[in-house]
Image (spheres, rainbow, N blue to C red):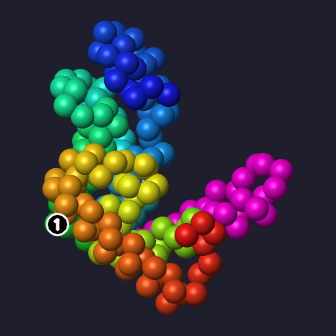
Amino acid sequence: MDNGISSYNRFLSGDKDAIDIIIRDYKDGLVYYLYSITGDMQLAEESAIDAFVKLYVEKPPFKGSGAFKTWLYTIGRNKAYDTLRKLSKTVTVPIDDAYYISDGNNIEDKVVDDERRSDLRRIISTLKPEYSQVLYLTFFEGFQNDEAAKIMKKSDKQIRDLIYRAKNALKREIEKEGVTFYGL
């Protein structure tokens, strides 16, 4: 996977298949980042779709002042906040989460891993929104602090402080719940 800009440039030049590469490479990470904002997987998926539709229909220019991924996640973040603003004016009823069954050979391991990831996402979602966002961007998506700062519209120092406080808050929540995570 390149950093996405070559695929986007090919798309802008008329190669309609290049947008498929961008979606394939970035959709999962974008959805999970947007989930840290919306707290609802369906809203996160819809916001990600809106971000990709914006690329497809409006073809906004990438100015190259940062990484393509940072630019794309910023578009997704804006779409998620737009969705939340619209929803704040309506009454919604949450629908139970749907779980997918793996068709792999070791279903039990996948179920256990999915439960751990679900527990971790659930615990992170109980943290302050800024904490969950900064944790997701820096640890799950691998953004550097300066890239996370651009996406969240914060300074580098604010991001460092947020990471420190978010990690401590996450540790307290994990200890309080008594959940075991390998590697944390």
Give 70 or 61, whichever is nearer the viewer.
70
> Residue 161 appears at what percent x and percent y?
25, 68
Instruction: Using the rendered view, name the quadrant where residue 32 is placed.
Output: bottom left
Tell me residue 23's x, y (percent): 44, 33
- Residue 160, image x, y percentages: 27, 63
Secondary structure beneath dot 1 equals: loop
Residue pushed farthest right?
Answer: 105
Indicate whether 68 appears above or below 43: above
Q: Residue furthest bottom?
A: 176
Asked if residue 40 lies left or right of residue 121, the reply is: left
Main secondary structure found in the magenta portion: loop
Q: Quick check: can you spot residue 130?
A: no
Q: Can residue 10 be seen here?
A: yes
Residue at 34% over, 48% down? 144
- Magenta stretch contains residue 107: yes
Q: Which residues are magenta?
A: 93-115
Question: Residue visible at 32% across and 71% down?
Answer: 164
The type of residue carrying mark 1 is Lys
Queried whether the magenta region covers residue 71, the answer comes back as no
Give the answer, above or below, for where 42 lies relative to 53. Answer: below
In the depicted structure, whether residue 40 falls above or below residue 123? above
Residue drawn at (59%, 81%) of the image = 179
Label 1: how many Cα within 10 Å (few below 14, some 14–19, many 20+): few
| Residue 167: quadrant of the picture | bottom left
Quickly name the residue at label 1. Answer: 89
Between 161 and 30, the one nearer to me in the picture = 161
For the C terminus, the image quarter is: bottom right
Taking depth in this image into account, of 114 and 68 the one nearest to the observer is 68
Residue at screen point 37% across, 18% down: 6
